Image (cartoon, grey):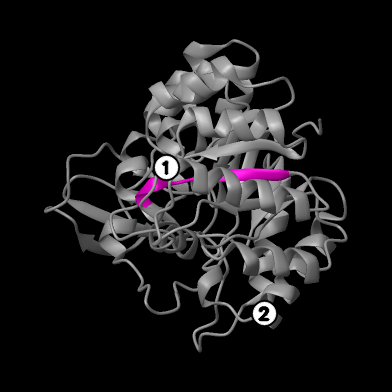
Amino acid sequence: MSRNIFKGLGIALITPFTQDGEVDYAALQRLIRYQLDNGADFFCILATTGEAPCLSRDEKDKITEVVKEITNGRVPILKYCGGNNTREVVAEIQETDWSGIDGILSICPYYNKPSQEGLYQHFKTISQASPLPIVLYNVPGRTGVNMKPETIVRLARECHNIVGVKEASGSLEQVDEIIKNKPDGFEVISGDDALTFSMVASGAIGVISVIGNALPKEFSRMIRLEFKGEYDPARTIHHRFTELYKLLFVDGNPAGVKALLNDMGYIENVLRLPLVPTTIAAASTVLSLPEMMPAWSSCRPVSYLPISTLPDIHWLMLTTTTPRLLASRSSLIIHG
């Protein structure tokens, strides 16, 4: 059986766009370098957070080349290939150049809501066609169907190149069932930032993270502390992210993290329809990591925005890069 190599902090990579809606390859390069320098262990590309349904084939191919060029073999790359038409997924696998790619992420078929046997047969067929290890993607909130633990374990036992599952069912009980019964070499990867602390504590080996796009250093640190059994400091980091977990997805993914990255100066706050940008108020209340704050004396307020209608929050620091955002319950202060 193949063994899973996708461990630690995986980045569910966003796709930056320019103001006129074209892929911003220069911003993508900067973002990948930033993530590599701050703890990224692998990249997951061209999936939900990357707005893949809104990209052309040529854009996907060029994004893939950019990621391969910048990572240069330093970390593994997991590339999405999935759908609800098994024949088409198989054809795409057979027609794709997989050089420089280390694995395939494939989602449960959506909309047509297959049975558990249908899910098993779908992924078995994909497994037989794939030249690479496969990570299953179970996200019933998007697909309308939950792949049950017994189906996941059955696939893990019977398909040698199915090496893991990105588990985003939201059920810790389901996670425990998979971990308890899985074969050696098959691993569970969190697909939910908010549950990552608990899932890693239960035996998951990492996360494919949305938050990691913007704040890889601290999220990676939390996971590494857990790997070493240092749960108290890891829990402290997890609790500091609590408001971010809630607010980053208020207007859907990747709207929240793109707004945050825009505030940090990395990208334009542009999405492709049918997705739309979130508001600055929602984006600007999301994170506090006190040890990341610069000296207060170096901050110079340049503008204020009211956020009195938002939930209770602590004084927050969004980023270590410019522009710096500090928020209180009553106002947002943007610092340059």
Q: Quadrant where the N terminus lies?
A: top right
> What is the quadrant of residue 26 in the picture?
bottom right
Q: Position of residue 78 (x, y in %)?
A: 71, 51
Vertical placement of residue 126 versus 181, above or below: below
Vertical placement of residue 291 versus 97, above or below: above
Q: Position of residue 274 (x, y in %)?
A: 37, 77
**Residue 183 shows in the view:** yes
Q: Which of the pair 94/238 is nearer the observer?
A: 94
Q: Which residues are magenta?
A: 134-141
Residue 140 among magenta residues: yes
> What is the quadrant of residue 281 in the picture?
bottom left
Q: Disc 2 on helix, strand or loop?
A: helix
* Residue where numbered disc 1 is placed: 296
Q: Give the numbered dot on residue 197.
A: none
Residue 294 among magenta residues: no
Q: Residues within 10 Å of mark 2 (few under 14, many from 20)?
A: few
The overriding secondary structure of the stretch rendered in magenta is strand
* Residue where numbered disc 2 is placed: 57
> Looking at the image, is mark 2 or mark 1 earlier in the sequence?
2
On screen, residue 204 versus residue 28, left or right, reads left
